[in-house]
Image: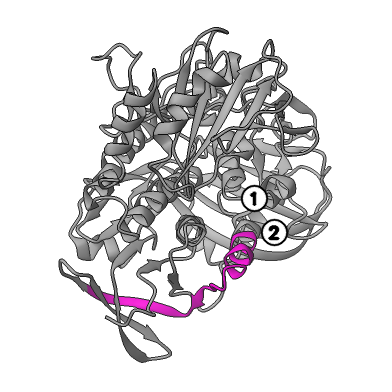
Amino acid sequence: MNSTRPPVLVVGAGPAGLVAALTLLQNGIPVRIIDKDPNPRIGQRGPGIWPRSFELFNFLNVPEVYELAKPVLTIRSYKHGTMEFATESLMTWHVEPTPTIPFHVPKLIGQQLLDVILRRRLEKFSCSVEMGTELRSFEQSDEGVTAVLAKNGILETFHTKWLIGADGARGIVRKQLGLTFLGETRDDIRLVMGDIRLHGLDREYWHRFGTFKRGVSLRPTDEIGEDGWQFVIIDNDLDTTKVAQSEELISEIIASAIPTEITINKLVWVSEFRANIRMVNKFSEGRVFVAGDAAHVHSPTGGQGLNSSIQDAFNLGWKLALVEKGLADKSLLETYNAERLPVISEMLEMTTTILNQALKTDSMTAARTPILFMLGINYRFSNIVLDEFAIPGKPINAYGVLDEEHLEAGDRAPDAPNLVQVGGGGPDVKTLFSLYRPWYHTVLVLAPSHADAVPILGALEAYDTSLVRSAVVLPSSASVTSVASPADLVFVDQEGHGYSAYLVEVGQTRVFVIRPDGVIGAIVHGTEGVKKYFSGIFLDV
């Protein structure tokens, strides 16, 4: 095989494919990413980004996603046939900000803009999406994957080592792998959604006319223009296929639903949608993986689809990078399937329950649950996490609600602000999240004194600092001005946020190994636990 060829081919350049590519590139793995569409997709599509996904973009160093996303507006529902509003409601659960959760509210960003942000980030690694390039077929062996690609009618045979199928529900990768895609297509909810430009409605609100079973909703979005709106038409009696093909019909339906004069300027993008609820039986076969809509599709209620997709890609990316570098055994890749399958299974169940409740009650109040924030998603059941303090044998609850009074290996690692760095020339204040990145593990040693941390730090010398970084976090009572330390960083937890978030009492020594995806890989007493955890990740050091 030509060594200059990228070892990973990513098929599909939606958010899942872009995040997979970006995670690999940040790990130093060259990537080729293709998309069969000749031009980047337009449309708001699924715009909701939940707090856990903002954390992921933070780890990937893409702050623009949070900065450019807009708050979720109040929804106004109107009395039938009038502009007199019946109710005002928030789409989401209200959560107070805490030191452990820096991104505490969901926000909205259209997929079109999100894709632009991620493609620009890829270009900083000299990687650009090859548009109009289609995967026709592939074959794999123990050594690699041979893909047949087509662009402008010209076929190309491309040899690579790994293939990631992020090519959507209708994509070729899952089908050719022979994975099942069991589930149901619901006929009790059909909708037409899209982007439109119109005047005549108050842009301070998200408007809803009619009912959940038959109605129109309009959400203002400046991404389309100063007169831009995302619309959803729900009506099971309509021929949604016919409606989606007619700008005139769409304009008529929207205008007739709104009992005030509006001016429709332009239909920008439109798509027909039915609730398909399906998932694969496994996320990989050999050297080929599926992620995002290629692996699971579900009800739009709850807005978990795009978020789950990028979290698939993030889980896979760091593991594939370690295996490709020869630092981890290929068996590590089996944990992609083992960790994501229970999460997605529970997610499908939950979003379907919300859909059923919405249809039954004509209300989206069932969607106002903190589970949707995705901060309670965990891999406690994974065979590569290690917890020397947890009680074994508890049932799997992979899609739980965040419980800040309880922390186990496999959980999301909490943030902690206002950590004062010791040494390093001047006062430097950091957050724990600023330490976590997708290309290395972070070992946090919370200890009463630096001397208590030294034996643990000594054990870390066996690992390359490009793979494992260390930080000692001392309690506020520790009087330390400078220290010569084998740790990469030493902090004083001036306000106690770190000890509080990680549930460590002052006087205890506890070690947390944070994985490259911001998940706690291990909670252990000391040196032996750290070695045991890494023996399950890396090949012999």
Image point 64% across, 39% down: which residue? 434
* Residue 25 place in picture, x, y as percent: 49, 62
Graded by Cα atoms within 10 Å as few (under 14), some (14 to 19) or many (20 or more), the crowding at tag 1 reads: many
Which is nearer the eye, 312 or 484? 484
Where disc 1 sits, the SS reads: strand
Residue 357 visible, this orientation: no
Q: Tell me the kind of residue under disc 1.
A: Phe
The structure residue drawn at horizontal position 58% and vertical position 37%, both measured from the top left corner, is 50
Please state, as top left, top right, bottom left or bottom right, where the N terminus lies in the image. Answer: bottom left
- Determine the residue located farthest toward the left in the rendered image: 142
The percent coordinates of residue 37 (x first, y second) are 48, 74
Q: Which segment did they paint magenta?
A: 116-138
Left or right of 17 in this view: 382:
left
Dot 2, crowdedness within 10 Å: few (<14), some or many (≥20)? many
Q: Which mark is residue 121?
A: none
Q: Secondary structure at mark 2?
A: strand
The quadrant holding residue 155 is bottom left
Q: Amino acid at mark 2?
A: Ile
Q: 230 and 526: which one is in front?
A: 526
Q: Are the two marked residues, 2 and 1, in contact with CB atoms closer than 8 angstroms? A: yes
| Residue at the image point whose x is 38% and y is 91% from the top | 153
Report x, y in % for residue 234: 54, 44
Q: Position of residue 239 (x, y in %)?
A: 46, 56
Q: Does the magenta run of residues contain 421?
A: no
Q: Is residue 400 above or below residue 118?
A: above
Judge by depth and name the residue closer to the eye, 85 or 300. Answer: 300
For mark 2, what is the residue? 196
Rendered residue at 45%/23% (across/down): 511
Q: What residue did someone put label 1 on?
A: 231
- Which residue is most to the front? 484
